[in-house]
Every structure is written in structure tokens, then in C-alpha cells.
Image: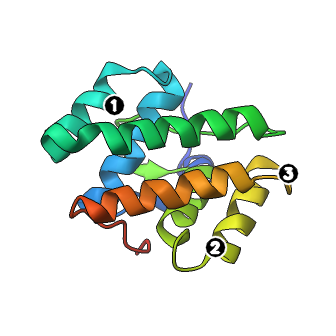
Amino acid sequence: MTIDTDSLSAILPHPIPQQQPAQLALFTIRRMAIGGLTDAHAANALLGRFGKSYRRPLVLLRALMAELARGAKRPIVVAPCCCARMTQAETMLLSAITAANADAGYAHEQLSILSGTGDCIGALTSAQAVSQAFADLGQPLNPLD
């Protein structure tokens, strides 16, 4: 079975971000979505980037993923870790995280659409905490290209 280019671009419409902090966040999100919140590869990736300070972004990303899993009313499609493109859901999630502190209204709107519910304050506050943790550790999550 082969997938034509049009089908692939419909499933994975966006390229991965160019900034390394956003790539790390995407990798960690994908690993937790596929391997669970306690995925060792996700923890190791954060340890490699942040050293001894890896626990804060790890715990906050876990909280964000748990909040999305708890509150989402529809599936959130995530691509495999090796994929060089992002799904629409991944793009919306990263956009929400990167904008969470500067534009909470936009981030809330993105998370509401992503999760299929208007009640996503927990996910919003988790996204704000993740964004702040990355910034505090010298790896700010800038808006996507």
C-alpha cells in the first residue's frame, strides 16, 4: 500500500519547527502521547537539554498531557517521533504553548478547538507553566515559523 503525496500532506500539513526548544517540546509530547507519561525517552531528552533542571519541564509537560487526555472530547492526532512534519493537532498544541503567556486568549482558543471543549482552563494553565519553565531555563519557546 502506498500513500500519495496529497494524502500525506493532508495528514501532516505543517513542517516541524526550526527552533530547537520547540523541536524538543514536540519530541517530548510525541513520546508521552505514544509511550505514556512516564516515557523514559522523553525524560532523557529533557535531561540532555536541561541537565539537573530537567524535572520542572518534565513534570509540567506531563501535567499538560494528562490534562489534555482527561478533558479532550475528541482524539488528538500525533505523528511518530521520526516524522519531519506535524499534524494539525500538534501545530495547534505547540502554538498554544508558545503563545500561552503572551496571548492567553489565543492559547485558550487553540486548546478549546484542539480538545473539542470550551472547558480547558487546566490545559491553558499547564501550557503557560510549560512555556515559562522553558523560558526560565534559557530555552524560550518562540512563536512557530
Q: Residue 117 carries which label?
A: 3
Q: Quadrant of the N terminus?
A: top right
* Depth check, front residue: 100 or 35: 100
Three-letter amino acid code at disc 2? Ala
Local crowd at mark 1 within 10 Å, few (<14), some, or many (≥20)?
A: many
Q: Name the residue under label 2.
A: 104
Q: Which colour scheme is used?
A: rainbow
The spot of residue 38 in percent (x, y) is 43, 20
Q: Quadrant of the C terminus?
A: bottom left
Three-letter amino acid code at disc 3? Thr
Q: Which mark is residue 51?
A: none
Residue 69 seen from this side: yes
Measured Cα–Cα span from mark 3 to mark 1: 27 Å
- The local secondary structure at tag 3 comes to loop
Residue at left 73%, top 56%?
121
Residue at left 61%, top 33%?
66
Q: Name the residue under label 1.
A: 42
* Depth check, front residue: 32 or 103: 103
Measured Cα–Cα span from mark 3 to mark 2: 16 Å
Residue at left 65%, top 50%?
123
Q: In this view, does 52 lie to the left or right of 72?
A: left
Local crowd at mark 3 within 10 Å, few (<14), some, or many (≥20)?
A: some
